[in-house]
Image: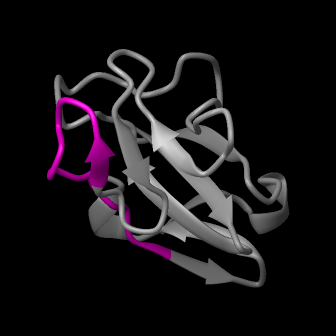
Amino acid sequence: MTRLCHIDDIEEGQSKGFEVGEKTVFAVKKDNIIYVYQNRCPHLGIELEWLEDQFLDPDGALIQCSTHGALFLIEDGSCVAGPCMGEQLIPINIDINDGEVFVKPSQAD
């Protein structure tokens, strides 16, 4: 498994980007749960953030694509507004052991 970070490396209501092999991914902490997705908007396949580690809308309630403003639910990556309505972000399967977040091997390719 590939280590991503410690759960305390991401503040509640914040996000952080990472490189895992050839992929870029990002993690969001909401209600003390870590959600990890491939850093790729389903609309054009481009990376989501407008600044380093900035994946959320101004309220921190939704994931936002900086290019066309698409909005995604943090809990499941479903697009709820924007040009890719009805599509979703690609989730990355993780394990958490002793506070360390690991990407499962099949996801690190």
- How has the structure been colored for display? one colour
Query: Is 17 left, or right, of 14 in this rendering?
Result: left
Instruction: Kindly indicate the quadrant of the structure image that contains residue 98.
Output: bottom right
Q: Residue at x 34, y 33 (%)?
A: 70
Note whether 104 is above or below 12 in the view shown. Answer: below
Residue at (61, 68) in percent of width and height: 34
Q: Is 79 situated left or right of 2 in this image?
A: left
Residue at image position (32%, 18%) is 68
Q: Is residue 65 above or below residue 92?
A: above
Q: Nearer the viewer, residue 52 or 4?
A: 52
Q: Nearer the viewer, residue 103 or 32?
A: 32
What is the magenta segment's predominant secondary structure?
A: loop
Residue 7 sits in quarter: bottom right
**Residue 26: image location, x then y, percent:** 52, 45
Residue most extreme to the bottom: 98
Q: Position of residue 91 (x, y in %)?
A: 33, 61
Whether residue 17 sits left or right of residue 82 in the image: it is right
Magenta span includes 82: yes
In the rendered image of this protein, does residue 56 appear above or below residue 72? above
Residue at point 35%, 67% (across, down): 105
Where residue 84 sits in the image (x, y, percent)? 17, 37
Q: Which segment did they paint magenta?
A: 79-94
- The quadrant holding residue 65 is top left
